[in-house]
Amino acid sequence: MHCASNKKLNRGHRPRGRFRVIATGSRRAVASFALSLLALGSVAVSALEVRQVDHDGERYQVVELDLRHDRLDLRWQDGEGHALASIEGLRAWADAHHRTLLFAANAGIYDQAFRPLGLHIEDGTTWRRLNTVRLPGTVGNFSMQPNGVFYVDRNGKAGVMTTAQWQSKPPAARIASQSGPMLVVDGEVNASFDTKSNSRKIRSGVCAPTPESVVFAISTAPVSFHRFGSFMRDALGCRDALFLDGSLSQFWTPQTGYVGAPAPMLKPFVGMFEVLSEPAQ
């Protein structure tokens, strides 16, 4: 339950397993989109790349950001205390602020009161504190150990760390979202995952192959935790990767539209990651 290319694939990492890039909406598509926006008087300068990747018989949508060019933000509300609730709500908010949405994805797991279940930091402000509760018998993805935090710090460097690591030495984060479980920890797929599990769902995750790059991935069909973690490690070069959400997850880009959960399965989102065009001058 939700509430409780050819380029840069490895950056020196040799992928394991069988994978191939089958389609890309990379710089050519982004450049075309940017020219369209320029013609409309808006400014879109983005280095994000969008591609589909086949890995061991399963297909994934991958969005890669270069933080030297793309500003990644995390947003829950509209500034007046109203939850944006959906990618369409986020896009309307961007339009009202004369920006264009270039990428959106729902962030970490939330509680039954539609609040982030764990740490949630926006623009340096902590909206929800780190959740370190580990109650016996607790069920749900967030409770699977270790869980962790994805962040971008105030110097524009990204990373993923376990909750215990964050609790011990938290970075000065500009944005952060806590979720669980960790998919990959120090180069190893989470040892708690059952390699023979029949639990298959749409799943999304994030990692930072380098401090300047962030990779988001979502399965286009149901997949097990172990196979998803293996994809993040072997095909995307993630040394540490965090699960974001399951059956309700969606990504959106201008090139692809919506990828992930079908509309009838959706519930209101809480935090959402976004990349926006630069404001018109």
Image (spheres, grey):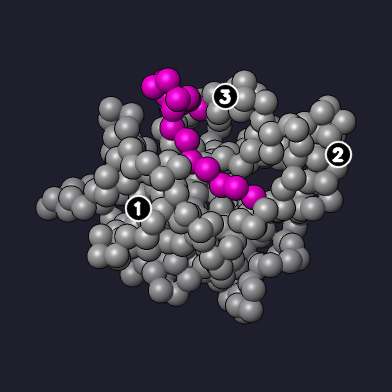
- Tell me how far mark 3 sits from mark 1, CA to CA: 28 Å
Q: Which residue carries the number 3 mark?
A: 93
Q: Residue at x 43, y 37 (%)?
A: 271
Badge nearest the viewer, 1 or 2: 2
Q: Of label 1 and label 2, which has the lower sequence position? A: 2
Residue 128 in view here: yes
Mark 3 and mark 1 in contact? Answer it, CB < 8 Å.
no
Q: Residue at x 64, y 50 (%)?
A: 70
Please, what is the dominant secondary structure of the magenta stretch? Answer: loop
- Tell me where the magenta segment starts and ends, as one range: 70-86
**Which sits in the foreground, 179 or 68?**
68
Image quarter in which the N terminus is found: top left
Question: Is 79 left or right of 258, judged from the image as shown?
Answer: left
Q: Which residue carries the number 2 mark?
A: 35
Query: Residue 235, how many percent across, how many down?
Result: 60, 68
Q: Which residue carries the number 1 mark?
A: 180
- What amino acid is found at the position of numbered circle 1 in the picture? Gly
Residue 78 magenta-highlighted: yes
Above or below for 279 versus 169: above
- What amino acid is found at the position of numbered circle 3 in the picture? Trp
